[in-house]
Amino acid sequence: VKPKSVINFSAGPAKLPEAVLAYAQKELLDHEGSGVSVMEMSHRSSEFSKILNNAEKSLRELINVPDNYKILFLQGGGSGQFSAIPLNLLALKSGHSADYIVTGSWSAKAAQEAEKYGTVNYVVPKKKKYTSIEDHSTWKLNPDASYVYYCANETIDGVEFQFVPQTNGVPLVCDMSSNFLSRHIDVTKFGVIFAGAQKNIGCAGVTAVIIREDLIGFAMKVCPVIFDFKIQAGNNSLYNTPPTYSIYIMGLVFNWIQEQGGVDKMEQNAVQKSGLIYDLIDNSEGFYNCPLDRDCRSRMNIPIRIGSEAGDEALEKEFAKESTEKGFLQLKGHRSVGGIRVSLYNAVTVEETRRLVTFMIDFQERHRQ
Ligand code: PLP
């Protein structure tokens, strides 16, 4: 039996703000008196143009995207960009090589994909477990690289950069899928930023891509037309049918973030919410363990082992069972990491996080030896 109220701590697709869902429900059948649902509208209609342009405008305002950056809303997810990035940017320099700072499972996948199209330089040593970020002074950056790539927040491993890497003029590309709009960023430090929507900014189906204009126009011949930044930018993301409903929901989430007080408020909440969980871990006398170095602890996705550093699987199974029964959903860790994982995206409230903390303290009281 489902508990009366549930809190969704999923790593993604993840919780959406209730106000956004309620609004979308209210106008599911009739968007602003048009008589049709957004799902049924032509992507070239004036109504949809308004939705698309408003979403872009809100995003520009939220993180001060300068005029010399294009914003695209594309299909293919974060993984689509793992291919689109090398296909569009490797040819920026004749060496067709790129630097990848691999700090977790998603940047590892991106690097593997880029290897299909050019030379990938692994900036930090490969490792089996991702729990830290090597000191910047040891990175082996190649000054002739076409770009430097990193993932700002590794959703599976919980490694989050608390700083923006310096690249000495080489364009910086960042996967912000799981921490986008949860902290202030200076867009001018980046060549390309991309983020799948299904964690912090909407539902699955759309990926926001922000590209500095001078990096557009270098796609390789083999680049699929739908991933060609020049073609998509030239057509305002309407070269082919875009994910219209996902763009609509994303626009509503942008408005909601603005109403809440913008990215600064999201950042403040993220610090507070993750602080509640990390304080609990640090005060649990080893009952709850987070494998990450403190300086790269994610504010968005917190992997936790229960019972010992390596994790007591029986206890973790019990935690998953009890938490689900109590309505705390999707806390099981990723299969490659084990344990549990608490995801605290923008839509999860401080109050909801407090309720989880209360449950976790109670669980510890009942199960500690
Ligand atoms: N990058 C990050 C940081 C992710 O967390 C994910 C998915 O969870 C991806 C990329 C891949 O996104 P998609 O499943 O949309 O291809």
Image: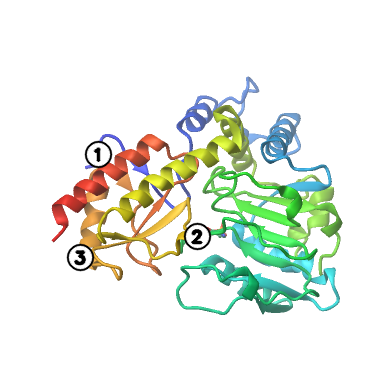
329 w.r.t. 55: above or below: below
Q: Is residue 321 left or right of residue 8?
A: left
Quick one: which residue is furthest to the front in this view?
137
The residue under the point 49% across, 68% down is: 132
Kindly identify the amino acid type of the residue bearing the numbered disc 1.
Pro
Viewer-side label of 2, 1: 2
The residue under the point 43% across, 64% down is: 292
Q: Quadrant of the C terminus?
A: bottom left
Q: Which mark is residue 314?
A: 3
Q: Is residue 100 left or right of residue 11?
A: right
Callout 1: SS? loop
Kindly identify which residue carries mark 1: 3
In the image shown, does 143 or 301 lie closer to the viewer?
A: 143
- How packed mark 2 is, by other alpha carbons closer than 10 Å (few <14, some 14-19, many 20 or more), is few
Viewer-side label of 3, 2: 2
Image spot of residue 231 (x, y percent)? 82, 54
The residue under the point 63% across, 69% down is: 136
Viewer-side label of 1, 3: 3
- Distance in Å between CA atoms under marks 3 and 2: 30 Å
Kindly identify the amino acid type of the residue bearing the numbered disc 2.
Asp
Kindly identify the amino acid type of the residue bearing the numbered disc 3.
Ala
Kindly identify which residue carries mark 2: 295
Image spot of residue 81 (x, y percent)? 66, 61
Q: Quadrant of the N terminus?
A: top left
In the image shown, does 68 or 48 lie closer to the viewer?
A: 68
- Is disc 1 in contact with disc 3, using a CB cutoff of under 8 Å? no
Can residue 353 be seen here? The reply is yes
Display colour scheme: rainbow
Q: Is residue 183 left or right of residue 53?
A: left
- Distance in Å between CA atoms under marks 1 and 3: 23 Å
